[in-house]
Image (cartoon, rainbow, N blue to C red):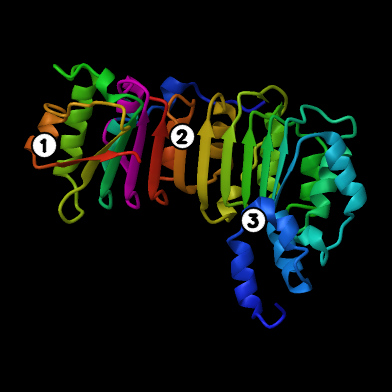
Amino acid sequence: MMDFPDRSAQEIPHHTLSLPALTTLDIDLQSDPSPRLITILSSISSAPALGSITFRHDKWSNIDQSSFQGTWVDMDRLLTWMAQRARVQGGFSVTLKWWPKDKPVWEGFLRDFRRSGGQVKTYVHS
Amino acid sequence: MNSLPQELIDAVIDSLPRSSLLSSSLVAKQWRRRSQQRALERIKFRSEAQVSRWCTDFPQDPEGIVSYVHVAEFAGIGSWYDPTIFGRALKSLGSLTELWVSKTGIPDELPGQITRGELGKEITVLRFWWSSCTLATVMSVILSLPSLDVLSIAHPGVESKGPLQSHPVASQRTPLDLLGLWGNVGGIGKALTKSGFTFRRLSLDVDLSGVEQLIVLSSETMVKLTLYGV
């Protein structure tokens, strides 16, 4: 029987993982980002070729639009941190994909990332 | 009709819906080969009886119409009365490049047949979806396919119990193009890590146990990362 360490022993320390070839990061969400997702993304220290991050969500309008609390704040901080270290020309862009029947309100969403000059695009699934 | 260039006929056939290919194969001799190639490019077996008939009707024939089959799916065959039939069918499909196994049991005999070079040499795409088998069997199949490039497993039925030897073979391979893992397949993820596989694209269920190690192992080669189910 193979013997593997448990998950807690497998977590990568924050900002220690270098991904030199990574150009595209896609994230499919069914609800708010989980702490585990934040932990995994927080492990990235360098992704110099990263030009595009895309979020898909089953229903953006289910998110509490008034506050964008919780792990969305963590995600916003993380994206801001990554954007400040982006090396691709023009920085990387964040694309939010949504379904036509959804009625997302993007105001206030990823505020820190936008303030730091990050580009946020929205895209409607056809 | 006979004066039409073959390229034009082929282009017409390529634009036809699958349901018309039987008819188009009967238009003229020039239409037959391409129509059959398209009609048989992808086949799906839904029962052991179908697989058995295939083995009887189309024994190994590298030059025959069996060579037109590039994608084979075995679906809904939970267990096999004759566990050798799966392997025999694959053996007859010498041009197979994609093998899809969904809700189908994988006989323990299969990895041995692959290892002996009897089948699967050209398979580049392997998809296991909701198929029941042991982790050892899945890993043996994966490790035995020399041309494997795309691996996709959604697999709550994998049994992790039983002995699983370490397979440090993947270091001799170039990075595979894609790994997709969804559902309760943490055992496979860990075994792939242990074997040293690296990938250019990873599509992973973020709740998968050992997801970090898969990412770390492919950190130098990975160009695209997709995380699901968060």
Q: Marks 2 and 3, how far apart in space?
A: 22 Å
Residue type marked 1: Arg
- Mark 2 falls on what kind of element? strand
Q: Marks 3 and 1, how far apart in space?
A: 45 Å
- B27 or B212: nearer the eye? B27
| Residue A22 in the image, given as x and y percentages of width and height | 34, 49
- Mark 3 falls on what kind of element? loop
**How crowded is the residue under tag 3: few (<14 C-alpha within 10 Å), some, or many (20+)?**
some
Q: Residue at x 64, y 64 (%)?
A: B13
Q: Mark 1 points at which residue?
A: A114
Q: Marks 2 and 1, how far apart in space?
A: 28 Å
Q: In this view, does B9 lie above or below B194?
A: below
Q: Is residue A69 among the parts visible in the rendering? A: yes
Specify whether residue A23 is painted magenta: yes
Residue type marked 3: Ser
Q: Which residues are the magenta region? A: A14-38
Q: Residue at x 66, y 38 (%)?
A: B139
Q: Is residue B95 among the parts visible in the rendering? A: no
| Residue A7 in the image, given as x and y percentages of width and height | 45, 22
- B127 or B217: nearer the eye? B127
Q: Which quarter of the figure is the C terminus of chain B placed in?
A: top left
Parent chain of label 3: B
Specify whether residue B79 is painted magenta: no
Q: Mark 2 points at which residue?
A: B204
Residue type marked 2: Leu
